[in-house]
Image: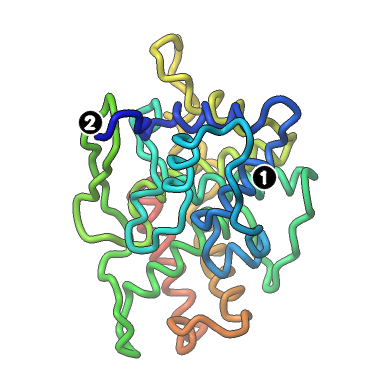
Amino acid sequence: VPSGVPPRHLATLLDILDALESPGGSPSTALNLGRGLGGVCSTPGCRAVLGDPPETPERPPGVTPTQWHFLTQLLGHHPATPELGTLLAPDGSTVALGPLLAGIEVGLRSGGFGRPLPVLNPPADPLLVVTIAEALGTSFVLAGGDKNNVTHNVTALGPDGCWDNVENPQNYTPRGPPSLVPDPVAIGAMDGVVLGTQLARGPLPVAQLLRGYYGAGNGSEERRPPSSYRRRDFGALVTPGRLEKEVAAVLGVLRALSPVPEWLRDLGTEEVATVARRAAREFSERYV
């Protein structure tokens, strides 16, 4: 590892967020960077909720060139290598930042901070659209069949993966064929739902929110951080039945877009229902 390359720990991101959010910075600064760099909310359903991304940002004052390089790598758009958008959290989980930060933005905006969210047609829960429902629906449709000779990935969920070094994580390697919902995306999505729900009740600086949720990771906590209960907390907010309804809803939102995504054109209503049911069941069995 070249000297001076910071570890891909959550703590590295928190230091950068501290610089962005103090003094007088706002929670939206960090979120706008994530959107502007392209790695957060690059899909049509998410953009229907959050709008088009801001322009590609310049390095903000207070952020060092090394930190900026770290951030542009982390929050850039890497469709072929989504593992570049992940960090190792203090609870030992690997978290994808895309769904996490999108969920945080929806939470802030639904709590009245920033622009109001649009009403989707057909109705869909914006928090679930941007975190898990769109990714899950897309993944299961693409994995489900090859009617139009569209190249499809056979797995719809997973895999997990491992870091090269837990003390100084730099490279995360998936352990198996990629899907659109690898484990870090599932974890980031669950965290995005839990934290987005919390923020809808009142805004917090993102750094403070993440510290409170993931813990500082220095062994000083007496009890487990809230993030270690993500499966329970997500499951309490999103039952399999509700997830099924929202996956079907987001596929409806995508079908109402112009142009309709190619992989969705020939999908009938019954097939949408089948995909939604299977996606919700398999996601809940694997992760919740």
Q: Nearer the viewer, mark 1 or mark 2?
A: 2
- In terms of depth relative to the viewer, which is nearer, 205 or 24? 24
The label number, if any, that marks residue 240 in the structure image: none
Vertical position of residue 37 compared to residue 212: above or below: below
Question: Which residue is rendered at x = 53% and y = 41% of the image?
Answer: 236
Question: Which residue is rendered at x = 43% and y = 74% of the image?
Answer: 274
- Name the secondary structure under disc 1: helix
Which quadrant is home to the C terminus? top left
The label number, if any, that marks residue 107 in the structure image: 1
Dividing the picture into quadrants, the one containing residue 250 is bottom right
* Callout 1 crowding tier (Cα within 10 Å): few <14, some 14–19, many ≥20: many
Question: Which residue is rendered at x = 65% and y = 67% of the image?
Answer: 48
Percent across and percent down for residue 219 are: 39, 12
- Name the secondary structure under disc 2: loop
Vertical position of residue 269 compared to residue 279: above or below: below
Q: Are marks 1 and 2 in contact (CB under 8 Å)?
A: no
The label number, if any, that marks residue 165 in the structure image: 2
Q: How was this image coloured?
A: rainbow
- In terms of depth relative to the viewer, which is nearer, 146 or 237? 146
Please give left or right for residue 200 compared with residue 81 in the image.
Answer: right
Please give left or right for residue 252 compared with residue 285 in the image.
Answer: right
- In terms of depth relative to the viewer, which is nearer, 182 or 236? 182
Q: Mark 1 or 2 closer to N-term?
A: 1
Which quadrant is home to the N terminus? top left
Residue type, numbered disc 2: Asn
